[in-house]
Amino acid sequence: MSAPAIFLSYARDDAAAARRVAEALRSSGVEVWFDENELRGGDEWDRKIRKQIDECTLFVPLISRHTEARAKGYFRLEWKLAVDQMQMMAAGVPFIAPVAIDDTRETGAVVPPEFLRVQWMRLPGALPTPEFVAQMKRLLEAPKVAPVDPGVARAFQPVGSENTGWKARATKTRIPAAVWIGAIAVVVIGVAATFLATRKGEPNAGAGTRPPTTEKSATPAPPSEARQLVAKARALYEPWDLARREDFSLAEQLLKKAVELDPTDGEAWAAYAILSCGMSGLLHDPSAERISAARTQAENALKFAPDSGQARFARAFSLWLNPATRDESIRLLRAEAGRQPTNRVVVRVTGNALRRSSQHEQALVYLDRAVALPGSDPVSQHNRAESLFSLGRFDEAEVAWDEALALAPQIINAHRGKLNLLLEVRGDLARAQAHLAKVPPDFFLDARGAYLAYTVALYARDHGKCLEYLRHANDYIPGVGPKAALTAVAHRLAGNAEAARTDFQAALRLVNDRLAAEPNSIALLAHRAAILIELGDRAVAEPLVREIRQRVNAGDSTLGAPRRSVAQLLAGLGDHEGALATLESARPSELFAAQGSTSLRHHPVWEPLRGNPRFEALLKSAMPKK
């Protein structure tokens, strides 16, 4: 075999999952063998599979509810062949590496007993993490006869055994007995020489005196149950952008149990605080209660483990969640990154805190450092791209996003960033559509991702896709407005006036309910005015538009892209002169930001102005950067 290779074994129902795992490994240079086309059957095909299992370096069975449900399947023959192959192996080198891609547990699993003698890896949703890819590469690179690297062995230690290695694959050639005898003699002579050397110079050495007694070195105590829970929790949440909301929720359950078992364990409290910071920062739970909990957990961590780097990091991280203490947070994070220069999470969070405070040049110093650490780091690459984009270094940003997505195509934020760049900077609707076809399904479960996809479909006048992309979005999309107003536009594009009117009315009810709680919200007033215009209620809409226009002219900047929004309302009312004058008074940055120039070219609301020389001049002045 020319290079180490992984054989991926899976049930037919898990083909898509297997493909994701294979692509992640291949993007890191790992050779993967698996039946991509699912064309199973025939003697030639069977011989090929048997040959690949015989020659592969690592056999990776994907375990799932689908494998559990099928008592019969070709994958079970592959498993049997792998177990047979393993019988010819000596201890020390990994061969079978089971990977569970859902919540299937080892206990009671319908797998060969040999699968239960090693610890399983877990990839919920079959979303490969950089840590998973790195672990697979370490296993492939492990020596084929010599003992396995301890770091690799610990990760896959046989369950219920103190042996630190796997059963290793045997070599084809048996070692002659003479060689073993010679090796044993060398060891015995070496031990004797060492013993005599240590005895030389001792009083009465060799004179029949009783040798001094020595205490046996203490065996390190196994980690407590609380610490074991902490380790499992960190494995779930530390991938950050690569971890799902469910991973954070499961990790929180483990950490709750850990601090209940040992309320004085500072490391457990530190892990809990860091998890809470992630829950807030990644918008899994941005509530005030979560922010307060993070601060309390960090204080407990420092109380019980004042010298812990994790505790110091947890406190610095928790301070970031409060705008009043962000400067202090950045100071402490930078200090901690100096103390822990090889801790990727600490270095990355420091860079991200600087990025979010618009200190992009300084942010890149830390994010570049995080990327340079051993192993891949698609999350830091994505964060680098965000800072590069903000600095106007668009080509570099696009490269960074492409590198992040090549390593981890499941990073939703990176897909959003790349799509935003294609729309806002490149003004390239065709490329945006092509990229949208490659995003993972979870992209559309994210409200911001669903809205961005809707925008691409709207500009392309694909009303069917508009509705499809918004299917899972909540009724009110933060920063955007009521979903029903968006679907109403799609229905109108499709010529379905009745459905459009029904949705506009539903959107109006939702906005009115929110205005009852926030009567002075200029964003909600703008939504209400736009919906009333669509419903033909000019008598109520016109005074609202005048109020919004006056507030914007007076300097109220709480409305996103305020002058462009006012111009859009005026265009809807048919006041083309007012709309053009408002657009002409806007700053170029406002016309450009947030898909501004692309919106002017493609959004249906501007249709009445297209062809007007003044509008065309505005389009030319807002040409996207190449």
Image: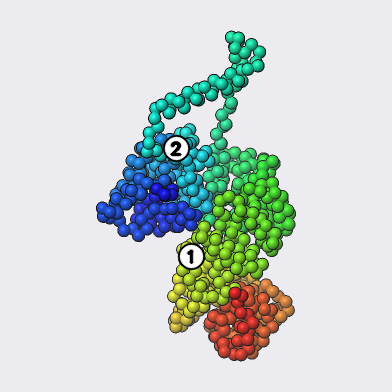
- Mark seen at residue 358: none
Q: Nearer the viewer, residue 314 or 96?
A: 96
Could you say where residue 497 lies in the image, as x and y percent from the top left?
A: 46, 83
**What quarter of the picture does the C terminus occupy?**
bottom right
Q: Residue at x 65, y 74 (%)?
A: 559
Q: Amino acid at mark 1?
A: Val
The image shows residue 281, relative to residue 115, as above or below, that is below
The image shows residue 398, relative to residue 34, as above or below, that is below
Q: Secondary structure at mark 1?
A: loop
Q: Secondary structure at mark 2?
A: loop
So how many labels did they put on this image?
Answer: 2
Work out whether mark 1 precedes mark 2 in sequence or the reverse, and give the earlier one: 2
- Mark seen at residue 439: 1
Q: Residue at x 63, y 76 (%)?
A: 592
Could you say where residue 315 lies in the image, as x and y percent from the top left?
A: 68, 49
Q: Is residue 292 visible?
A: no
Could you say where residue 312 lies in the image, as x and y percent from the top left?
A: 68, 46
Could you say where residue 358 lies in the image, as x and y percent from the top left?
A: 69, 63
Q: Residue furthest left?
A: 43
Q: Nearer the viewer, residue 165 or 205?
A: 205
The image shows residue 547, relative to residue 290, as above or below, that is below
Say few, some or many: other residues with alpha carbon within 10 Å of mark 1 (under 14 / 14 to 19 / 20 or more).
some
Comparing marks 1 and 2, which lies closer to the viewer? 2
Q: Residue at x 70, y 59 (%)?
A: 362
What residue sits right under mark 2 in the picture? Answer: 145
Q: Residue at x 52, y 38 (%)?
A: 150
Q: Are marks 1 and 2 in contact (CB under 8 Å)?
A: no
Q: Is 225 placed left or right of 332 in the picture?
A: left
Q: Nearer the viewer, residue 256 or 446?
A: 446
